[in-house]
């Protein structure tokens, strides 16, 4: 069966600078695709391509069998005919309209009757727990409340796809977490197809059925959150997701030698040499006067203490501090082999 949304080989340049370099993505109905990546990698541009705010130079974008953008065939469906809705980072509410009027706006322009409009606005405000604020103006609301209103405003038109561009980035950490949980519940309850842009891994994992990690205008890897975490394919993904340690390795005398210094048991399914990652939670940095490495950093992070250990040749490993390990102290390193994985050597 064809996917709900299909983007093939999407390419966009601004002047001479390519910003999307052949992006292929598909999204099934009712699922949430998260675009995750560092600043400037092209997340907003890709979202804008779907929205109809940015036209493709090459490639194709098709939703429910209808071509939205195909420069080779000279097809471009304008934004207002696509049936999508967008939530932006800065809320973008109309300041001169009340909360209810803001939410009603999209329905009014679609010619929905006053009675139907009132019913749907009330239901949408209820969903985001903002019913009590219907007659207030945006300026009298907190950032979190304003963002709830703009989510209601987007949901009320029952968009074919809901597009969200870093909707929680302007909020403080606690509020961000609270709204993340609510948004995740809302999307699932409504069965809402969505594309969500973020550079925050926690948001990506909490909200995404599928996460596309982007780098310099390309998708580096696209997978379900757990698969992405368990089996990153490239160094970039391993370091971006969960900040894993990355080493060159060599298999020798029944062991895998990591960075020429550390050992884990041999892996029959790995090549003789290559590159691998070791998750931070699989590394214990233990005080040991006979240890061969030195603790170079220690950070209390609440639930756990992270430490970095190094060797004179500048090889460094980051993991969980065990006991009173302090910078300058001799340490030994225990690695849980289950937290190590092979990376594609060429990427
Ligand atoms: N209208 C434009 N004209 C020229 N260059 C642009 C334009 N829009 C974006 N760019 C450039 O394209 C690249 C990708 O931008 P984009 O906004 O898609 O990145 P992003 O991944 O959303 O980043 P951020 O996380 O900072 O929002 C950037 O280098 C940006 O400077
Ligand atoms: Mg952006």
Image (spheres, grey):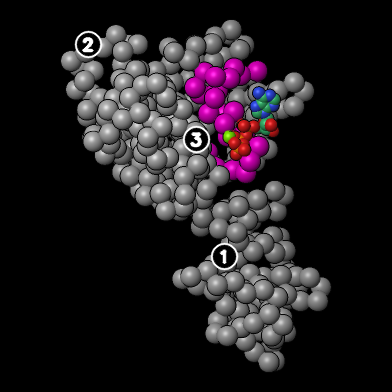
Residue 279, label in figure: 1
Mark 2 or mark 1, earlier in chain = 2
- Residue 245 covered by magenta stretch: no
Whether residue 158 sits left or right of residue 169 in the image: it is left
SS of the residue under disc 3: loop
Pinpoint residue 185: horizontal percent, then vertical percent. 31, 43
Q: Quadrant of residue 100?
A: top left
Whole-number angstrom distance, CA of label 3 to CA of label 1: 32 Å
Q: Residue at x 42, y 53 (%)?
A: 174
Whether residue 149 sits left or right of residue 119 in the image: it is right
Q: Is mark 2 within 8 Å of ligand 2?
A: no
Mark 3 or mark 1, earlier in chain = 3
Mark 3 or mark 2, earlier in chain = 3
- Residue 52 covered by magenta stretch: yes
Which quadrant of the figure shows ligand 2? top right
Pinpoint residue 297: horizontal percent, then vertical percent. 67, 73
SS of the residue under disc 1: loop
Residue 135 visible in the snapshot? yes
Q: Residue at x 61, y 19 (%)?
A: 56
Pinpoint residue 11: horizontal percent, then vertical percent. 64, 24
Residue 103 visible in the snapshot? no
Instruction: For the residues labelled 2 and 1, say whether their Cβ atoms are less than 8 Å apart.
Output: no
> In the current view of this chain or complex, which residue is farthest to the bottom?
289
Whole-number angstrom distance, CA of label 3 to CA of label 2: 30 Å
What span is colored magenta in the figure?
Answer: 35-57
Which residue is identified by label 3? 89
Q: Residue at x 64, y 82 (%)?
A: 326
Which residue is identified by label 2? 113
**On screen, residue 293 above or below 109:** below
Front-most of residues 84 and 118: 118
């Amino acid at each position: 069966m064809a996917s709900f949304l299909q983007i093939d080989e999407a390419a966009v340049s601004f002047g001479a600078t390519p910003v999307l370099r052949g992006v292929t993505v598909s999204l099934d109905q009712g699922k949430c695709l998260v675009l995750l990546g560092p600043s400037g990698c092209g997340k907003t541009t890709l979202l804008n391509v779907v929205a109809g705010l940015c036209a493709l130079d090459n490639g194709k974008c098709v939703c429910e069998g209808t071509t939205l953008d195909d420069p080779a065939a000279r097809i471009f469906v304008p934004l207002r005919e696509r049936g999508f809705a967008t939530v932006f980072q800065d809320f973008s509410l109309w300041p001169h309209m009340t909360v209810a009027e803001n939410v009603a706006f999209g329905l009014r322009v679609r010619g929905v009757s006053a009675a139907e409009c009132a019913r749907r606005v009330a239901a949408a405000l209820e969903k985001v727990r903002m019913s009590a604020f219907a007659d207030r103006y945006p300026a009298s609301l907190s950032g979190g409340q304003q963002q709830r209103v703009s989510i209601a405003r987007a949901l009320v038109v029952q968009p074919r796809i809901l597009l969200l561009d870093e909707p929680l980035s302007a909020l403080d950490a606690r509020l961000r977490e609270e709204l993340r949980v609510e948004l995740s519940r809302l999307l699932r309850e409504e069965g809402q197809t969505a594309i969500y842009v973020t550079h925050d891994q926690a948001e990506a994992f909490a909200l995404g059925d599928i996460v596309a990690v982007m780098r310099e205008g390309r998708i580096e890897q696209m997978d379900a959150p757990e698969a992405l975490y368990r089996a990153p394919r490239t160094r970039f993904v391993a370091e971006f997701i969960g900040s894993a340690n990355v080493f060159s390795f060599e298999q020798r005398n029944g062991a895998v030698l990591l960075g020429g210094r550390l050992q884990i048991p041999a892996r029959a399914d790995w090549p003789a040499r290559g590159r691998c990652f070791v998750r931070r939670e699989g590394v214990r940095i233990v005080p040991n006067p006979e240890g061969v490495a030195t603790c170079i950093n220690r950070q209390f992070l609440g639930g756990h203490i992270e430490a970095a250990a190094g060797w004179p040749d500048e090889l460094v490993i980051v993991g969980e501090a065990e006991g009173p390990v302090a910078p300058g102290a001799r340490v030994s390193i225990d690695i849980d082999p289950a937290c190590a994985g092979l990376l594609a050597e060429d990427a």
